[in-house]
Amino acid sequence: MRRTEPDPQSGPAQRAELDEAARPGEEVLQLRDIAFADAHALLARYDLQLERVADGDAIPGSYWGDSEAGVIASVVHARGDTPVHSLLHEACHLIVLPPERRAAVHTDATDSVQEEDAVCLLQALLGDALPGVGRARVLADMDAWGYTFRLGSAAAYFEHDAEAAWAWLIARGLVDADRQLRIPARTGRNHQGDAGQGASTPPSRE
């Protein structure tokens, strides 16, 4: 398994590039393992669209290639074999952007270390809003897929090494002061059905 070495100038959370042969595949939860409607509805609450790609087709806007999710403007593209953590990670890069910046996104959403660190938290929180997923599975799958963290695991980062990232999310209204996810309320624009049990429905953030 080939991983990038931690960069002392980067944040506590880093994404590692793996050889295709080293990817764990079915060891991680995939989109086909959960209800597509649940994922679609959750993303719709953030005014995002989830587009399913046919099995065997290349995924549009995928930075990492292979089965990893892709992003183009406000659309997240994923196949049945796309890891759920990948879908959530790429969706989170769009969620943290204002609508006017989302429109310009194609494949690579950011080069911001602070945003990348925050997205690693946010994707785990979104896991709690998806039936059959949960933050513990998202964090475990991040480790299995090759994310690297200063304290050795995604869970350790989430619990003990992410103060700056929590502050970043709180400042943008994505989580509250108690570090609970703030999912925008359904509106006529984003009403696509319920996001599933475990999804909170606080007032829409400004």
Image (cartoon, rainbow, N blue to C red):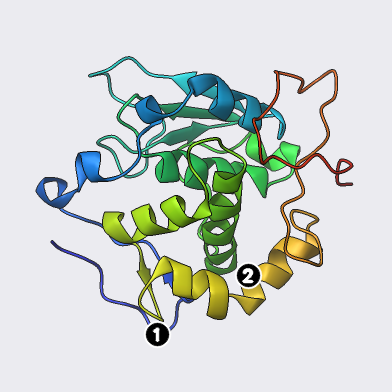
Identify the residue shown where x is 70% and y is 67%. 168
The answer to whether 132 appears left or right of 47 in the picture is: left
Give how far across and how far down residue 32 sits, in percent.
Answer: 36, 25
Give how far across and how far down residue 162 sits, in percent.
Answer: 58, 75
Q: Give the mark toward the camera: 1 or 2.
A: 2
Name the quadrant containing residue 34.
top left
Identify the residue shown where x is 77% and y is 64%. 170
Q: Is residue 43 above or below residue 178?
A: above
Identify the residue shown where x is 38% and y is 71%. 153
Mark 2 surroundings within 10 Å by alpha-carbon count, few (fewer than 14), some (14 through 19), many (20 or more):
many
Q: Is residue 60 visible?
A: no
Q: Nearer the viewer, residue 7 or 40?
A: 40
Identify the residue shown where x is 70% and y is 18%. 192
Mark 1 surroundings within 10 Å by alpha-carbon count, few (fewer than 14), some (14 through 19), many (20 or more):
few
At label 1, the amino acid type is: Pro
Q: Is residue 84 visible?
A: yes
Q: Nearer the viewer, residue 111 or 179?
A: 179
Give how far across and how far down residue 86 sits, in percent.
Answer: 41, 43
- Numbered mark located on residue 165 in the image: 2
Is label 1 in a helix, a strand or a loop? loop
Name the quadrant containing residue 107.
top left
The answer to whether 76 appears left or right of 166 in the picture is: left
Name the quadrant containing residue 4.
bottom left
Give the residue number, with chain letter if any, for mark 1. 8
At label 2, the amino acid type is: Ala
Q: Nearer the viewer, residue 63 or 117?
A: 117
The tag earlier along the polypeptide, 1 or 2, is 1
